[in-house]
Image (cartoon, rainbow, N blue to C red):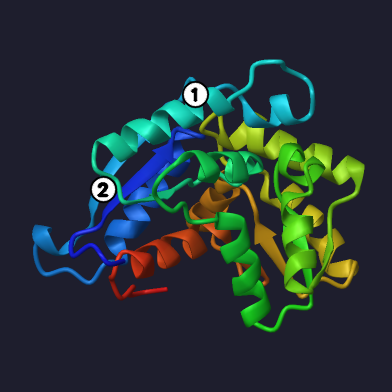
């Protein structure tokens, strides 16, 4: 960043706990001796933003883009010089949003796929909402980066959505036996890594602990955000 004091805008609330975790992660991984060593951050947590997956899958006509655009514009007016969106599904709208704003937006999906490639992954499993899977957001990025991918079978994808919406978003612990069965299907399909491509799934890694098979998109975004704002991340 050219600005001596960049201001990070977080377009959040998609969902709220994921925004909290992202902010916490940024704070914990910043090398700081005092308050002033941390990032200047402005956060919009618009929990009432229409559901992204429902709109993408045609289950709702309530387009979340207009609300996202208004909130992003307000972050810029408040002084944000760079934006981050801690929601993978919302990246369906990334290109439209990036074109409408005068400041850069970090692309969580691109950064995560590039991270997987840098780790030597040649076949990436995609664990995400049905909106993200159905819109091929990760699949297209994998193709652009020259790596193969696999997605869960339809029954397993349905189970994953139940974990996301009926457990994590409701503040409950995830059914880890079921989650690992879904992940094992991707392992059996030849995946060397699997992306936690929904920020609710990042909370599983936080709460349950997961091995190196899983790449946490929230961690990737946090690390790249710190770098983009001129900080040297610690603890990743």
In the structure shown, which secondary structural element does the residue marked by tag 2 occupy?
Answer: strand
Residue that mark 1 sits on = 67
Q: Which mark is residue 41?
A: 2
CA gap, disc 1 to disc 2? 20 Å
Q: Nearer the viewer, mark 1 or mark 2?
A: 1
- In-image side of 228 versus 110 (left or right): left
Total of numbered circles in the picture?
Answer: 2
Category of crowding for the residue at label 2, using alpha-carbon neighbours closer than 10 angstroms: few (below 14), some (14–19), many (at least 20): some
Q: Identify whether 64 is placed above or below 161.
A: above
- In-image side of 43 versus 104 (left or right): left
Quadrant for residue 148, please give it: bottom right
Category of crowding for the residue at label 1, using alpha-carbon neighbours closer than 10 angstroms: few (below 14), some (14–19), many (at least 20): some
Q: Give the x, y percent position of residue 199.
A: 55, 47
- In-image side of 59 versus 119 (left or right): right
Position of the C terminus by quadrant: bottom left
Q: Identify whether 150 is placed above or below 234.
A: above
Q: Identify whether 152 is placed above or below 75.
A: below
Residue at image position (75%, 67%) is 144
Res. 180 visible in picture:
no
1 or 2: tag closer to the N-terminus = 2
Identify which residue, 75 or 31, lies in the foreground. 75
Q: Which mark is residue 104?
A: none
- In-image side of 72 versus 176 (left or right): left
Quadrant for residue 20, please give it: top left
Q: Give the x, y percent position of residue 4.
A: 18, 65
């Amino acid at each position: 960043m050219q600005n001596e004091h960049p201001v990070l805008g977080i377009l959040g609330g998609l969902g709220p706990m994921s925004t909290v975790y992202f902010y916490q992660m940024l704070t914990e991984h910043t090398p700081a001796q005092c308050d002033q060593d941390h990032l200047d951050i402005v956060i919009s947590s618009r929990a009432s933003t229409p559901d992204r997956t429902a709109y993408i899958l045609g289950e709702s006509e309530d387009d979340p883009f207009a609300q996202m655009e208004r909130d992003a514009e307000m972050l810029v007016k408040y002084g944000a010089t760079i934006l981050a969106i801690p929601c993978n599904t919302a990246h369906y709208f990334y290109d439209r949003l990036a074109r409408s704003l005068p400041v850069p937006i970090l692309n969580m999906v691109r950064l995560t796929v590039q991270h997987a490639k840098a780790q030597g992954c040649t076949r990436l499993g995609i664990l995400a909402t049905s909106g993200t899977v159905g819109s091929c957001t990760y699949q297209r990025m994998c193709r652009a980066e020259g790596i193969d991918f696999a997605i869960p079978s339809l029954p397993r994808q349905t189970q994953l959505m139940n974990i996301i919406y009926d457990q994590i978003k409701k503040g409950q612990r995830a059914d880890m036996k079921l989650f690992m069965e879904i992940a094992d299907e991707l392992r059996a399909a030849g995946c060397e890594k699997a992306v936690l491509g929904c920020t609710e799934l990042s909370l599983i890694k936080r709460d349950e602990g997961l091995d190196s098979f899983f790449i946490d998109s929230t961690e990737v975004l946090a690390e790249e955000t710190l770098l983009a704002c001129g900080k040297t991340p610690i603890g990743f």
